[in-house]
Each structure stands twice: as structure tokens, then as C-alpha cells.
Amino acid sequence: SFENKFNSKIRISDESVIKNAASMFYGIGAISGGGATSKLLQNYPQNQRDQILDYLFLPNFGASLHMLKVEIGGDSQSTEGTEASHMHHSWDLNYNRGYEWWLMKEAKKRNPNITLYGLPWAFPGWVGNGTSSPYNYPSLTAKYVLKWVQGAKDYHNLTIDYLGIWNERAYDVEYVRLLRAVLDHAGFKNIRLVVGDGDWGPAHDVLNDPQFAAATFALGAHYPGTLSSDEAKRTGKPLWASEDFSTFNDDIGSGCWARILNRNFVDGGMTSSIAWNLVAAYYDNLPFPRCSLMTANEPWSGHYEVTGPLWMTAHTSQFALPGWYYLPVGGGSGRLPSGGSYVGLTDSNTKQLTIIFETMSHDHSECIRPSLPPYTVKPQNVTIKLAGAFASITQLYYWKSVLSYKKGDSSTYFVKQSPLQVKSGQLTLFLDVDVVVTLSTVATATKGQRSQPPPSKPFPLPYSDNFQNYQPGSNPLNLVPQVGSFEIVDSPPTVGNGRSIIDNYNVNKQCLMQTVLQQPVDWCKQSQPIAVIGNYNWSDISVSASVLVPSVNSTTGIFVAARIDQGGCGAFQAKGLFLWLFPASNQYAVTNDLAQTKKIKGGSFVYGYDAWVKLTLTLQSGKYTAKIGNQTVANSETLPGSTPSTGFAGLGSENFGLACFANLSISSAN
Ligand code: 147
């Protein structure tokens, strides 16, 4: 209504722009990893997979990301699962593991200018030489990270632009300096270090330690709530929100991302914002479901969803490029008088101009963290006066998103409007509450659209995977390691003349192996390898796999399980129904939890090492049956009341040590 409208005037000019490192725009990024967030993407049908990648990376199309930040896999749980390391052991090196190499190449294919940023969440245990810190043997850590960037270059032709230190854990001044020196010595002077992917604390050391300051390119803080510290500003370093967002990708998640994309600069002087995470290619029942720019977690159906946060990204990313400069607060960027904010960006020649406005209301733009202090936004008319180099602009392209939170109303995202005419360097724009508007001289933006994805379908049953149709080193489709690292290997390492005493599985074939031998330098510590698969709503289900424990570097126990009720950093406390075999003691057990605190049944079963045997667990109508090979060890026994009513299927081992799996098979027991 009229009385709510407020008229204000803002001046957009290049006169006060300072073209230095701290005001340069480094782009909008997104994170794959931290951890296993892209797990289900690689096994999409090629057609849909390419569409998804286009929405994320193709310039002038969708999110059109400027930066891709990936996890340097550390064989340990880092939120949605574990990502494989390129060096499981000090003697090991393999650049074909996981999916981040592949993803980086797909991103580069679409945008050769996309910048790449690598960051470890965890490290294999040898990097800490048995300790829980990567800084006790800093030269091991630096060498390990160097190996990763070398592999990127030599095996995948990928140039890494930025490296971080240790996600949301301590940084170490000595290590940062050493890493800088090691990179320089190996010819990677181009790689810039972002410190420390936590809070603004490292600013203090930058101000006090010239060598550390020289090694540090940018300060990167997580979930900064759009604010940076005074010390951080005093360093003169580029300040980044090196991880932010992490909010469910509905309209409120869109509001969150739109608000912080602007205000990270306006309030905190941050010149890059990086979303956790890129794409929700992980099961919904793992932590932080769909806290992502878009959703693609049904490779079996090909279904995916292009969601609001992706288009919020486009409002900035399609209208400014890394190397442009932010116009300073008060001189082209700032807060709007009736609430909301605007940022101005110009290219290095001051030829192009982009202004992004957001008027997100408090309740429609709260992010997962930190809490957002209350504020109000009102509809407003903004008169924009273009001055200096921008005075000659006569027309601005106009793109708009209108977020609606009323029931039955739907939001409209990233819609091209008629261009606005600028008369005598001036135009007036009406801004309602909860809108995002981009005004720009840039003409190339489009709202990309690919053909409609197939409809959603539940995880298919029956399901089986014999693990034969893979390259060694690959991660198994759909099966998501939560603790430990599981990958396809040629054959179990110790069964050259192997036996198949109980199961008739061919010993010379490929299998899936848990490869971690010692406690990693963890991000969230857990010690019982487990991988989950399927549909969390499964209740009456039959799960079987052939299992083998090699006689060297052995785990002490191996299992299959059903109704696994959790993954992520809480995987260690997973409940469910677990059927175990312990080759050292020739025992078996049925437990209600991964930690084996709730043992239901047990007894002897002679099995031994290097032999395949099939474990079958069937849950039906409140009862369960367990079989080892052809022998039934529990027949139609009542399921304990503490058994979760639904959950994932899975497999794993009792501790770090080799464990092999084949012929995974899951069917409905309804
Ligand atoms: C971050 C991690 O870096 C990501 O890998 C992912 O776990 C993300 C999920 O929101 O969060 O870690 C944080 C976990 C907890 C807090 C902050 C960051 N916290 O409680 O403030």
C-alpha cells in the first residue's frame, strides 16, 4: 500500500572504486565434498547427468559457477560420507578414485575459466603418523597435499588455483609456511592459499607474522553471518565466505543465499561466497538433506530438481566475472533505506556495470547458522543515479525473482524483464519485499532450460551389484561409505590360490574392498567401517552379500545389515540389525547396533580367512532370519523392540583392516 512505500536515492559511480586485491570479485563458488555430497551424481544416465552439469557450470545458463571447491578425500567421514584419498597408505598412490577429478573435468569442459579450490576435511592416518593432527609431521602433510595437486595436473590436466588448510579445524602457522614453500619449490607458485576455513582467527597471525602473511592469499571464514572481524579487515587480504549457505533448497533457502550473496560484501567486505553444497547427490536421510543449489539424488530414475538457490546464484554469477571489482559501500554498494541491500560490480575497464538488489525479509531468509538478528524490510522506490563512468549508460537489462511464501502462491525465479531505460543518468525502481533484481549492462544472461527430467521413483528392488563392471579404484554405485573407504579392487589381495569353501563365488573376480588400515586424521572420528545403500523407508527387506576377510591386514569382523538408522558423523551410533562374522574367533553374532553394545544372538561358526561366504539377513513381519552360507543361524526370531522400524541396507567391518564384499543383493521381504 502507498503509505508503506518509501522513496530513496542511491548513487552508483566508479569514482570511489579502489581496484585492489581486497575489493576484487573472486566469484561465486560451490562445494562438492565435505563430504560425499556428489556421490550419486556420477551414476546418473548420461543425458540427465549432462543436463545437471550444464545447470551448474555452463556460463550464461544456470548457476554458471565461477569456482568449484572440492574435498581432498581423506578416507574419513566428512558429513554425508567418506571420500577416497589418493594415498590410502604412505606407499599408495592412485589418481582414479572417487568422483572429484571427474567433476572438476566436467566443470572445466563447460567453463574453462572456472577456478578450482581443494580442501581436506580429513587425512589418512599415515599423514599424522598415527596421531590425530596433521601438524605433528607437517612435511608429510605438505607432501600429501602436493601429491594431490601434482596428480591433478599430471593425470587430469587440472590446474588447481586455491588450496585450503584443514576444514574447520586448527590451522598451523608453521605448516602454512611450509606448504607455501613446498608448493613454490615444486613449481606451483600459482596456487594461492586460503586460510583457514574456520573463523577469522588467522587474521591475528597475518597481522603479526610477515612470513605467514606472505603465505596467505585470502582469509576464508565459514558461516560468517555476513560479518568479518576488524582484524580481518585490517589485513587488507581478500576476505571470503569460504563456506556458507547450507540451507534447505526451498524458497527460504533461496532467500538465505540471495541475502548473504549481497551482504557478505556489504556487511563484511567479503568478495567471494561459496555455497555448501553444490548438488544434493546424497540420500535424503543423511544429515543436511538438500542443503544444496539443486537436487540430484535419484540416479536410478534420472529425476532431478533445479531449485531456487541455483537461480539466486545466477543473479550474480551471470552478470559479473572474477576479476571485476565491487563498488565500495556508500559508493555503489550498501544497505537500502527501507531494508535490503545492493551491490555494484564493474569490470576492470569500468565499462560494464551490474547492480544486484535483494530485499529479503528476516523470516524468509534465515540460514542454518548463525542466528539472524531481527530487522524489517518495507516496499520501496529506489531512484538510482548513475554517475562517473556510468553516467553515459542509457539502458540496463533487468532480471527479477519474486519469492512468495504464501500458501498456494509460487515464487518466480530469474525472469527476464523488459530492459529499463536510463534518462539523464537516472531511473526509478520499485522494490517489493522478498525480491531479487539484477540491473546490468551485461546482455548475455539466459535462464537455461533442458528437457524435463523423468519423474521421481523410489530406489529399485530387487537390487544387485556383483561389482564386476567397474574400473579398479572406482567407488561402487549407490553404496555410500560412511566410515572407511570402499573401492573396487581386482581381487582380494590374499586369495591368489584362494578358496571358496562355502559360497561358490569365483575368487578371481573383482570385489569391493574396505581399504583403510589405520585410524585416519579425522574430521569426525569413527572406527567401524560401514557403507549404506537404498531407501531409508525400507522395513521388511532381505540383504545378502558374499564376504571375505583377507589373512593379512585383516579386520576382525565383517557384516551385512538392514534398517540402518543413521549415517554422517553419527554413523558410529547407528542402530539396525547387523549380522556379523568374526574369522579370528570363529564366531558369529546378531546385534542391534554397529557398536555391538546390543547383542541379540551369537555362537560359533567356523569360517576362517581368505574364504568367501554369503551372509543373508531377512526381516519380515516383526521377525528375522540370519543365514551364513546355507546354514540358518537364526530362524524367524522376534525382532527386538529396539530395532529401528526402517532404514538403509549396508555392509562393513568391525574395525580398520581389509574386508571384501561381492554379490550384494537386496530384495523386498514383503
Ligand atoms: C560445515 C562443514 O564444513 C560441512 O562439511 C558441512 O558439514 C556443513 C553442514 O552445514 O557444515 O560444518 C559445520 C558444522 C557445524 C557448525 C558449523 C559448521 N556449527 O554447528 O556451527
Image (tube, rainbow, N blue to C red):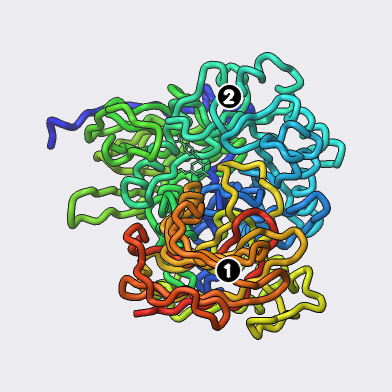
The answer to whether 25 is drawn above or below residue 84 in the figure is above
x, y percent for residue 606: 64, 72
Q: Amino acid at mark 1?
A: Ser
Q: Is residue 241 above or below residue 119?
A: above
Q: Residue 328 — which label? A: none
Among the two numbered marks 2 and 1 on one chain, the one whose residue lies closer to the N terminus: 2
* Residue 264 image offset from top left, x and y in percent: 46, 32
Compare residues 101 and 436 and report the one nearer the observer: 101
Give the residue type that dot 2 points to.
Ile
Q: How far, Cα to Cα, is label 2 from label 1? A: 75 Å
Please tell me in which quadrant of the rendered image residue 103 appears.
Answer: bottom right
Q: Quadrant of the N terminus?
A: top left
Is 371 or 386 nearer to us in this picture?
A: 371
Query: Circle 2 sits on which residue?
Result: 18
Q: Is residue 499 left or right of residue 80?
A: right
Q: Which element type, helix, strand or loop, lies under badge 1?
A: strand
